[in-house]
Amino acid sequence: MDSYKDLIVYQRSYKLAIKMYQEVEKRMPVTERYGLTSQIKRAATSIPLNIAEGYAKASGQKETKRFLQMAKGSSAEMEVLLDMIKDLGYIEVKEYEEYTKQYIEVGKMLTGLIKRITSN
């Protein structure tokens, strides 16, 4: 692998972050601009950002693992945020299920990558 951009988990999390900006943000009320909308943007972008930082900046396996764990935490955070915006009626159940499924997959991929890194 030449770059973090070659990682499928990076590619998926990046695309999901773009979707959160383009699709979910539009559905949020203006009153949530500095609340849930802001939190969704931060959590969604945190995943690919931590993957990139972990690979670009990390000086070793332990450091890379730490950044990947932060990305995994942000993926779980997105699941909670999706629960909230669904329960508040800001997104449809079908969208909620699709986004949640994708964030669960990203979390599993990160778990696998962490295990692979720490087993080497």
Image (cartoon, rainbow, N blue to C red):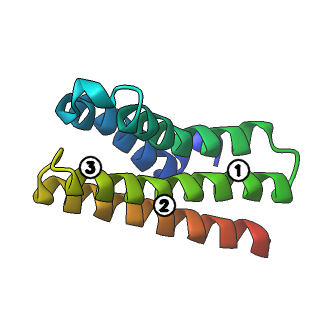
Q: Residue at x 58, y 69 (%)?
A: 111
Residue 47's x, y, as percent?
53, 46
83, 120: nearer the viewer = 83
Q: Which residue is mark 1?
A: 67
- Residue 87 left/right relative to 9: left
- Evaluate if marks 1 and 2 touch, with contact meaning CB atoms under 8 Å apart: no
Q: Nearer the viewer, mark 2 or mark 3?
A: 3
Tell me which amino acid carries mark 3: Ile
Q: Residue at x 40, y 65 (%)?
A: 105
Going from N to C along the chain, the mark reached first, 2 or 3, is 2
Mark 2, other Cα within 10 Å: few <14 / some 14–19 / many ≥20: some
Q: Secondary structure at mark 2?
A: helix
Separation of disc 1 and disc 3 at Cα?
A: 27 Å
Going from N to C along the chain, the mark reached first, 1 or 2, is 1
Tell me which amino acid carries mark 2: Ala
5, 75: nearer the viewer = 75
Q: Which residue is mark 3?
A: 85
Furthest residue to the right?
A: 59
Tell me which amino acid carries mark 1: Phe
Going from N to C along the chain, the mark reached first, 1 or 3, is 1
Quarter holding the C terminus is bottom right
Label annotation for residue 76: 2
50, 96: nearer the viewer = 96
Q: Secondary structure at mark 3?
A: helix
- Residue 108 left/right relative to 15: right
23, 39: nearer the viewer = 39
